[in-house]
Image (tube, rainbow, N blue to C red):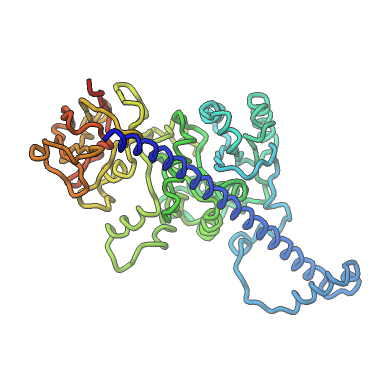
Amino acid sequence: MNKIFVWYIIFSKKLVAYQREFHALRERLRAAEHRTLQRSSELNAILEQFRRAIAETNGSKDALSNFSDETQKLLKELARRKPLQVPNIYHHLPHLLNNEGSLHPAVQVGQGRTGVSMVMGIPTVKRKVKSYLSETLHSLIDKLSAEEKLNCVIIVFVGETDIDYVNSVVAGLEKEFYTELNSGLLEVISPPASYYPDFSNLKETFGDSKERVKWRTKQNLDYSFLMMYAVNKGVYYVQLEDDIVAKPNYFATMKNFALQLATEDWMILEFSQLGFIGKMFQAPDLNLIVEFIFMFYKEKPIDWLLDHILWVKVCNPEKDAKHCERQKSSLRIRFRPSLFQHVGLHSSLAGKIQKLTECCPFKTEGMHNIDTPLICVFWLRYLSSPQSCPCPASVCTCVFIKNPSLIGRFLFRSGNQEHPGDKIENTTVEILPFSDAELKTKEKYKQTEDRFYKLAQFEKGVAEGTVDPAFNPVVAVRLTVQKNSAVWAIISEVCMLPLV
């Protein structure tokens, strides 16, 4: 028994090391893929310049004589081709053709860092009441380790064309975040005035006022500019806002969660349920998202457009709405609890008061955990969103224990002071012994097909009890939901005491 236990410990450690190496390899492959896409984009840009050169020469021999024989040959071949008319960004934003610099930042401050794991984008505009940008940056930067600061980029997008205002923002950030700007961790950009179209002729839709339609239309363009700037910088892109507070260890949590889902075909990982905060995308998907936004940027707000992309990808018009929601949940995966809290009261839209905050604020009071348990977020996501739960029952979560442990008592408590009704019901507590070959208590407890033993049932949101010494050491503790939950649920306390 002891030899098996020692072997299991050694094997577990090796398995963890192999998993880390595998995830690191996947990340390097993603980085290589991004570099390939970047080179392809650069080649396409050169090709576009050639085509423009052809158009400008208009067949003039004098103009063509400035090019080498090889270049002239290439230009003539391009000119002779009669391809189909391929739609591009200029079909949706024709005003960009009026100025060659329309897609180049008017202001660009920073070191231009690339090749990182994660890029975080923060759009900000001039607020009439209060700016939260400085507090947001401090919250994000102060919670990064030294290693993490080398593996990410934070891009502040100042969505204003008043160059004096933009320069004042830059000056303030240079004074307060000089080290971060100089190291490459922080960058600041702003678009040229020619990037924006004429907003005076926008159609009022969905009952929105003219001012609100203009605000949401510009917001779509701001997000698109930021995404286009960020697409070749890293593996993942996270959309944030300029009035948030980040939870400790947020960077590692997001990265590890994304790596855990590396084999799944996800499109959006949500680390906050509010607005456009904490939305993670894989960098290659940004091109599709930007193209879609450009097609409908005047029609609907950004969150609606993102939902439409998911609908187009996986929803069957012949199926009902519930089926569609289940399908979309495979592409849009929510992590709980939230890693970002919204703190801004005054919206960037004049006169709008934003009182929304996370329903599950990240508090740690009352939490008593042993060193290593990790609550699986998949079950929390399903239980907390019963309207889109893909599983009618038997949805599980595990409190995984990295090494087999001796557990004497356990306590799971759900609901909290802010949300006392968000309790877990119809759920059993189950454990997996390291070995049950010599167990003499099998008859006392029901055993599942996968060797777990049922120890307790949640009652009034609480499950507690003792663990029979015969079950120890324990490999895992699991909560299994027997029925769909009609309400959101919050696990507020997890306590497992060692066997004495």
Q: Is residue 202 visible?
A: no
Position of 64 relative to 262 (above/below): below
Residues 330 and 320: in front is: 330
Position of 193 relative to 150 (above/below): below
Q: Residue furthest left?
A: 443
Q: Is residue 199 visible?
A: yes
> Where's residue 160, x and y in %?
62, 40
Residue found 72% across the figure and 64% down from its top: 48
Position of 148 relative to 265 (above/below): above
> Where's residue 498, x and y in %?
26, 23
Residue found 76% across the figure and 66% down from its top: 52
Residue found 75% across the figure and 63% down from its top: 49
Residue found 68% across the figure and 63% down from its top: 44
The answer to whether 2 appears left or right of 172 in the picture is left
The image quadrant that residue 424 belongs to is top left
> Where's residue 345, x and y in %?
44, 30
> Where's residue 9, x and y in %?
36, 35
The image quadrant that residue 476 belongs to is top left
